[in-house]
């Protein structure tokens, strides 16, 4: 029984960190999209806004899965699996937005 409690506590701890940070990153992506739209009027079009929107969708999926992990915390096994999915999606979003920013800085995209 203590093993189940430790899995549940660990799951809620990570998922409770992923949820607010994912929501913040959605805001960061939205800000980036707005700034790129302003810059496009002056410098021409790019695909940065589209890639930032894709990263934003990844952060939304991460937020939703972390919410579900917290919501289903009574079912420790399911909660833990959903949390792992949220973690992977979140890391994918971080890698994606970092690539977008780097490629944009070097004017590749």
Image: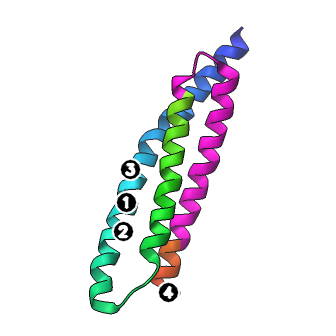
Q: Residue furthest top?
A: 1
The image quarter containing residue 82 is top right
Q: Whole-Å distance between the Cαs marked 1 and 2?
A: 6 Å
Q: Residues within 10 Å of mark 4 (few under 14, many from 20)?
A: few
Q: Looking at the picture, tell me which residue is in the foreground, 66 or 8.
A: 66
Q: Position of residue 41 (x, y in %)?
A: 27, 86
Q: Looking at the picture, tell me which residue is in the foreground, 1 or 56.
A: 56
- Tags 2 and 3 touching, CB below 8 Å: no
Q: Is residue 71 left or right of residue 91?
A: left
Q: Secondary structure at mark 4?
A: loop
Q: Secondary structure at mark 1?
A: helix
- Tags 4 and 2 touching, CB below 8 Å: no
Q: Whole-Å distance between the Cαs marked 4 and 2?
A: 16 Å
Residue highlighted by disc 3: 24
Q: Earlier in the sequence, mark 3 or mark 4?
A: 3
- Nearer the observer: mark 4 or 2; the answer is 2
Residue highlighted by disc 1: 28
Q: Secondary structure at mark 2?
A: helix
Position of the N terminus by quadrant: top right
The image quarter containing residue 85 is top right
- Residue located 50% across and 70% down the image: 51
Q: Secondary structure at mark 3?
A: helix
Q: Position of residue 63 (x, y in %)?
A: 49, 42
Label drawn at residue 32:
2
- Residue located 35% across and 61% down the image: 30
Q: Is residue 17 left or right of residue 10?
A: left
Instruction: State whether residue 7 is above or below residue 63.
Output: above
Q: Whole-Å distance between the Cαs marked 2 and 3?
A: 12 Å
Q: Position of residue 49 (x, y in %)?
A: 42, 73
Label drawn at residue 106:
4
Q: What residue range appears in magenta?
A: 70-99
């Amino acid at each position: 029984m203590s093993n189940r409690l430790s899995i549940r506590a660990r799951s809620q701890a990570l998922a409770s960190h992923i949820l607010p940070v994912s929501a913040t990153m959605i805001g960061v992506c939205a800000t980036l999209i707005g700034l790129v739209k302003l810059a496009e009027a002056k410098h021409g079009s790019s695909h940065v806004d589209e890639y930032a929107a894709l990263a934003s969708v990844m952060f939304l999926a991460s937020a939703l899965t972390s919410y579900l992990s917290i919501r289903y915390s009574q079912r420790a096994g399911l909660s833990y699996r959903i949390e792992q999915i949220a973690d992977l999606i979140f890391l994918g979003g971080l890698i994606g937005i970092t690539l977008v920013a780097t490629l944009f800085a070097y004017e590749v995209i």
